[in-house]
Amino acid sequence: MSPNQDATRVRTNMPEALIETAGLVKEYLVGEQTVAALRGVSVSIQNGEFVAVMGPSGSGKSTFMNLIGCLDSPTRGDYMLAGERISALSGDALAAIRNKRIGFVFQQFNLLPRTNALDNVELPLLYAGVPAAERHQRAKKRLVEVGLADRMRHHPAQLSGGQQQRVAIARALVNDPVLILADEPTGALDSRTSLEVMGLLQQLNRDGMTVVIVTHEHDIAAFARRNIHFRDGLVLEDHPVQKINDAEAMLAHAATPVMAA
Amino acid sequence: MDLLATLRIALRALRVNKLRSILTMLGIIIGVGAVITMIAVGGGAQARVEEQIKSLGSNLMIIIPGSTTSGGVRLGGSSAQTLTEDDAWAITREVHEVQSSAPSSRGSGQIVAGNSNWSTVIYGVTPEYLEVRDWPIVSGRGFEPQEMTGAGKVALIGQSVAKQLFGDIDPVDQQVRVRKVPFTIVGVLDKKGQSMMGTDQDDVILVPLTTARNRLFGSPQGKLRRVGVISVKVRDGQKMKDAEDRIRELMRQRHKLQQGAEDDFTIRNLTEILQAQEASSKVLTLLLAAVASVSLLVGGIGIMNIMLVSVTERTREIGLRMAVGARAGDILKQFLVEAVTLSLIGGLLGIALGLGGSLAIGQFAGWRTSLSAASVVLAVGFAAAIGIFFGFYPARKASRLLPIEALRYE
């Protein structure tokens, strides 16, 4: 995989924090009651970091993810992405941010069924208004990068879970985002393909891409360089990872395929 | 997002649920087909009436002899020969609304040409007759003045007679015998088709009025210059009713009828009768189209129904599209284009059904149908409008989904 020039440039041009949240609060109205999913979260993530957000279910980690992914708006508090104040933006402006700045990877891959890999990867470019010829060219390039040069015309149903997730990663990368957000990216994969996917994310991060993943598995979180633990809507712990797992080395070491998790 | 890409997505989505898409379209197909067929049927009826008006001659009135009372016995219409040739000339001269009036007398008889013969209607006419009836001569010539005054043995024949007697041979200058009297055919009349009563108007031979009187129909009419019918053409732009009143007044004067005495003639405003028929056939067309439109409306509701199902089924897809940058407007457009595509394809297939349907009705029911480009355009436009109207609500529902909720939807 070639070095990601765009992400590198972003990092050098913008010395300030990529993600800066201040007192982020998210409340939901459940019937008559107000339930707080986030109760004041202030986190700063720099360009080029690899962060794993952890916590049990109901800890607020998913809500945090949705907020920094511009999929939802905070009830209170401030969120700056790459120097831009997100909290006050309209729905269409948020859509544009998601389109151009953020690449999403989901647990269930969320590829369009009966649509080939190439068309799936092109999807963000379609909404960015990129002309057809350029769409094909850029999507092809990303699919080659994730090692699916020979699977471009395959439909999701004809691909393995690991291949589907790689298509999803190619889709996340195709618009040259500043941030990759992965929500339980290995949750639906066996341990060997999990290694492959984490290896891909580590590779991206080494090339300069900022990666934030949400996971509840400690050994997956260990592939990141920094872990943030959530509990009851607050940050419980925020620390660098002492011993970072190297997915490529582990793959090379695993001579025989690991049984499905 | 460009329209072409949106259209591709829509077509792909419709292909995924082929059977469902086809069933949904069926409503529109039947609706559009029904509208086109019904308009064609109504239009056919209308065209037929219009054609009759045209073949009759425009602004035409006929005057026929009325009832008479003879010794206390009332005799029916046309029982007396009360009209004269001079009545016709007086009408032309004195009623300024009238463009032309033509006296004619009618009889029937056998025509023999070579070894073929044909029984037909014989009219004794003056050159005005062709003007009043808007009836051109397609080959040959009309009657010359000296043939009119001198009871020339010349004749004009209708298309049906020409075909019966001469087939493909040119009848002009051929000799025929009408009631055993030799005549020369000098011209052939244009085709007129069926009359409003369904008789063949081309099955006719015209001879000069004087010739008919002196040589064919016998003498009783001769001296008094009686005629059977006076046909009157009213000038364009003049009211038929005014002309009718003036003619009645003049005729009563000429026939010396006392105040309060019954008319000894009847004036029939044929154009007016046909115009009433035309108006009623227009109402019929409208009614048929309205009933057919109901099925189109039901088809539209079918589209709305299926689009609502589709939005629910594809909630996760909508969530994903939003996550990768689709704006609410993009989602709206996507589902709207899908609904319109559904209704437009249905509309196009409906045109085929409508064309087939009108041909089939023409073929099997023997009804005349008339397809109009306007009805096709109208039906397709209506189909598209239905797609937009009934597609809008589901599309807006889709576009208003929240990205996270849509993504999490199971």
Image (tube, rainbow, N blue to C red):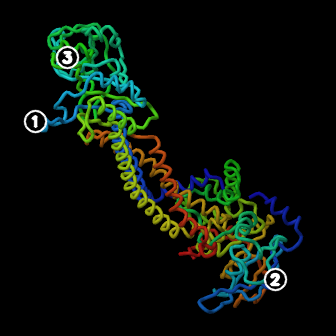
Marks 3 and 2 belong to one chain? no
Which residue position is annotated with label 1? B71
User: Image quadrant for the N terminus of chain A?
Assistant: bottom right
The circle drawn on residue A22 is: 2
How many residues crowd mark 3 within 10 Å: few (<14), some (14–19), many (20+)? some
Which residue appears at 48% of the width and 45% of the height?
Answer: B377
Compared with B323, B129 (above or below) is above
Amino acid type at circle 1 is: Gly
Question: Where is residue A60 shown, x and y percent of the image?
Answer: 69, 85
Q: Closer to us: mark 1 or mark 2?
A: 1
How many residues crowd mark 1 within 10 Å: few (<14), some (14–19), many (20+)? few
Foreground of the two, B363 or B80: B80
Which residue position is annotated with label 3? B222
Label 3 marks a residue whose chain is B
Foreground of the two, B91 or A115: B91
Compared with B352, B113 (above or below) is above
Mark 1 element type: loop
